């Protein structure tokens, strides 16, 4: 086609591409964030939320940044300017996609001088519903941003091939480097450039000569040599990504999903991608990895892929766009096949097709007219089919984009597609869908339905810890504190290092008045995360609730040093109480030492030391009373309580046994022994002692059902049996 005509067609074709893309995706302008990676990467990411800083800039180049510093910096800049405004981020995504569509069109038009076919490829790229995930999901900024530099690299490379210069070469190389800094997956671009050298650039030929089939055009060695710097950048990016994956979550090479199964999935998924390209229905953000793949599927996929490869190679001489398009698809897919993986890799993902389908689209755009030849009717039918395909893609993209309105609509749609996939590997994708839908329902106030989805998530995959935390939180908010505690304990059994689980479980224990366990849980959390201000503050509250003012002061001081907003006021109040208690303790101590204090004041002194958390002094006071009267019931009870507060349960039991010898018929003694044994986790012995207490006349059934010291016993089978045995006796 004459260049003048080509230039004349460029403007209306460009307008069509831009306007149709904007129309297809226009509804995402009102969409919000979704609770799938949007939270991790943006809305709850402390690096993004702390704004631009030298520290965050350096972090963006660390292994923890997924080897995508440019993406993180873009998030941070936009947050710095616009805050957490979802519509702004969606507008950024759409603008980048439109730019990618336009640049792809320009690149192909410049390389081929075929604006209509180039526009057809760009239109399919713009409107194919498989690309909705990359455009409508803010967490996929790396995809469209790396795509932007990918397209610019194509344009720069073409300019370099027209007139070689080191400036043009360096420009192409720099743009490629920026693309890698947005997402390392564009590392296959050097291979794609070599394909473009073959067609449409014509720098590398392959055909039959006098000596048979051979390469023609520029020397192959030179073409390979000029790709070496690109390959070097790809290698650096690849290594950085592998190191980063290992630092973040470990690189799995076989112990979770076997190498054989991953190879099988790679082969089968390639065919599935082609199928979804032709018939893009039942698209979902989660496709769970299969637990097993039948041998016939693997064999079938291998046959299909081999056949297409052979056909493409056989057509190389006469129809070079066919092998270029086919190997573009295969080459660009390599980073997404999951041979080496971080975490449990999905079966496939729509977002992986963003740049990979371009090759197939090129093969179609040039291959179909070639197949039609000069037959006008067939060419007209083909053109009509192309128009229908573009219109259908636009309509399907409009519908698919609607599913990304918010987390509720997204995961409702996902479950409608994969809800039956119970045979997937660990069913992790299905569990994630239920959990994230539960979160969306929870945030909208529908806690009961949220609980149902959380329970379904842990049923599907009991080793997935996120829904346990969500379940515990939701149950606590609905008033089911025992159920919340059970869920959070299971979470800590699965993942003992989860700080927010320690915090939440401790809070639940405080609400159940089980202050001792709350304190123990908070302390365990602080052993792992000594800098967690919230844990220190909540520990202080638990100490206060228990009556340990001294412990509360220490905890509030630590929280205040770490910047907890409420800690200073709580510290002032606790210190005032502490000073009053210390003054009282000093007064009582002087009177006791002077010998003018009776047993009641000595007992008060011991109780005061207990409230100050000075258990050794408290024990000394109670022992002083017992030295004067070994049968002092109040002192023995108080001493046993002090030992229990110190978690010296053996001496607490010894003290109660002494008391039991003096008062064998006292039900309070047996009851307190049941409490200590329950706190030790000896539920069988605790049940026996509680049975004895009831037999001796203990009748406070309400206390039995609510006493925090009996928590371990109440959740045991022994307690259920005991309650059935005692009936209404309590």
Image: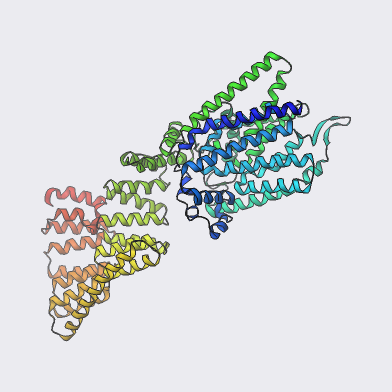
Q: Position of residue 456 (x, y in %)?
A: 37, 39
Q: Quadrant of the N terminus?
A: top right
Q: Quadrant of residue 580?
A: bottom left
Q: Nearer the viewer, residue 84 or 563?
A: 84
**How are the colours assigned in the image?**
rainbow
User: Farthest residue in the right direction?
Assistant: 210
Residue 515 point in image, percent of width and height: 27, 60
Residue depicted at 29% across the width and 56% down the height? 509
Task: Decide which of 69, 36 is in the foreground and name it.
Answer: 69
Placement of 473 over or under 379, stated as above or below: below
Q: Is 722 displayed left or right of 425 in the figure?
A: left
Residue 300 in sight from this viewpoint? no
Relative to 263, 574 lies left or right: left
**Residue 250 at x, y percent in the picture:** 54, 52
Q: How many marks?
A: 0
Is 32 or 222 nearer to us in this picture?
Answer: 32
In the displayed image of the protein, which residue is found farthest to the top? 377
Residue occupying the point 69% across, 49% down: 174
Asked whether residue 634 is in view, the answer is yes
Q: Residue furthest bottom?
A: 594
Place residue 546 in its image quadrant.
Answer: bottom left
Q: Position of residue 140 (x, y in %)?
A: 54, 42
């Amino acid at each position: 086609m004459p260049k003048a005509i080509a230039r004349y067609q460029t403007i209306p074709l460009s307008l069509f591409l831009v306007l149709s893309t904007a129309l297809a995706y226009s509804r995402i302008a009102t969409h919000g964030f979704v609770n799938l990676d949007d939270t991790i990467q943006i809305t709850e990411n402390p690096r993004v939320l702390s704004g631009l800083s030298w520290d965050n800039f350096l972090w963006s180049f660390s292994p923890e940044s997924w080897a995508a510093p440019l993406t993180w910096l873009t998030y941070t800049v936009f947050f710095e300017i616009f805050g957490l405004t979802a519509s702004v981020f969606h507008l950024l995504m759409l603008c980048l996609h439109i730019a990618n569509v336009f640049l792809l069109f320009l690149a192909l038009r410049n390389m081929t001088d075929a604006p209509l076919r180039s526009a057809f490829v760009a239109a399919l790229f713009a409107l194919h519903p498989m690309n909705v995930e990359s455009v409508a999901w803010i967490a996929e900024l790396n995809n469209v941003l790396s795509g932007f530099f990918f397209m610019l690299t194509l344009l720069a490379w073409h300019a370099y091939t027209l007139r070689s210069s080191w400036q043009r070469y360096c420009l192409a190389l720099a743009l490629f480097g920026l693309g890698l800094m947005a997402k390392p997956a564009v590392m296959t671009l050097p291979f794609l450039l070599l394909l473009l050298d073959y067609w449409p650039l014509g720098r590398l030929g392959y055909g039959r000569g006098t000596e048979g089939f051979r390469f023609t055009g520029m020397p192959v060695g030179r073409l390979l040599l000029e790709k070496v710097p690109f390959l070097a950048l790809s290698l650096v990016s690849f290594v950085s990504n592998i190191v980063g994956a290992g630092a973040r979550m470990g690189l799995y090479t076989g112990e979770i999903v076997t190498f054989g199964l991953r190879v099988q999935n790679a082969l089968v998924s390639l065919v599935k991608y082609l199928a979804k390209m032709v018939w893009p229905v039942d698209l979902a953000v989660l496709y769970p990895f299969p637990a097993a793949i039948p041998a016939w599927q693997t064999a079938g996929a291998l046959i299909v892929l081999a056949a297409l490869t052979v056909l493409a190679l056989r057509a190389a001489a006469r129809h070079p766009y066919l092998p270029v398009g086919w190997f573009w698809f295969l080459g660009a897919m390599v980073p997404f096949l999951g041979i080496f993986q971080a975490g449990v890799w999905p079966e496939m993902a729509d977002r992986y097709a963003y740049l990979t389908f371009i090759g197939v689209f090129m093969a179609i755009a040039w291959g179909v007219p070639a197949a039609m030849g000069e037959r006008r009717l067939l060419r007209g039918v083909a053109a009509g089919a192309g128009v229908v395909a573009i219109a259908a893609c636009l309509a399907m993209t409009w519908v698919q984009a609607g599913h990304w309105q918010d987390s509720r609509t997204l995961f409702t749609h996902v479950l409608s597609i994969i809800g039956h996939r119970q045979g997937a590997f660990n069913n992790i994708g299905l569990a994630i869908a239920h959990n994230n839908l539960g979160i969306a329902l929870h945030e909208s106030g529908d806690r009961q339905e949220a609980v149902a989805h959380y329970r379904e998530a842990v049923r599907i995959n009991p080793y997935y810890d996120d829904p346990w935390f969500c379940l515990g939180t939701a149950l606590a908010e609905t008033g089911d504190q025992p159920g919340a505690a059970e869920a959070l304990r299971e979470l800590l059994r699965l993942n003992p290092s989860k700080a927010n689980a320690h915090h939440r479980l401790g809070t639940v224990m405080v609400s159940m008045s089980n202050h001792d366990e709350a304190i123990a849980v908070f302390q365990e959390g602080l052993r792992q995360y000594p800098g967690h201000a919230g844990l220190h503050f909540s520990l202080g509250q638990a100490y206060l609730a228990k009556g340990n003012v001294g412990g509360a002061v220490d905890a509030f001081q630590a929280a205040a040093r770490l910047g907890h907003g409420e800690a200073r006021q709580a510290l002032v109040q606790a210190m005032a109480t502490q000073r009053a208690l210390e003054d009282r303790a000093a007064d009582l101590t002087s009177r006791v030492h002077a010998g003018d204090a009776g047993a009641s004041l000595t007992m008060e002194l011991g109780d005061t030391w207990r409230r100050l958390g000075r258990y050794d002094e408290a024990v000394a006071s109670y022992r002083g009373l017992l030295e004067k009267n070994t049968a002092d019931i109040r002192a023995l009870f108080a001493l046993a309580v002090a030992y229990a507060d110190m978690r010296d349960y053996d001496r607490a039991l010894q003290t109660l046994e002494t008391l039991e010898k003096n008062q064998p018929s006292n039900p309070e003694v047996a009851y307190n022994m049941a409490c200590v044994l329950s706190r030790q986790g000896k539920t069988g012995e605790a049940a026996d002692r509680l049975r004895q207490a009831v037999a001796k006349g203990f009748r406070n059934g309400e206390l039995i059902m609510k006493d925090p010291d009996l928590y371990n016993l109440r959740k045991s089978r022994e307690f259920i049996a005991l309650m059935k045995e005692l009936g209404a006796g309590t």
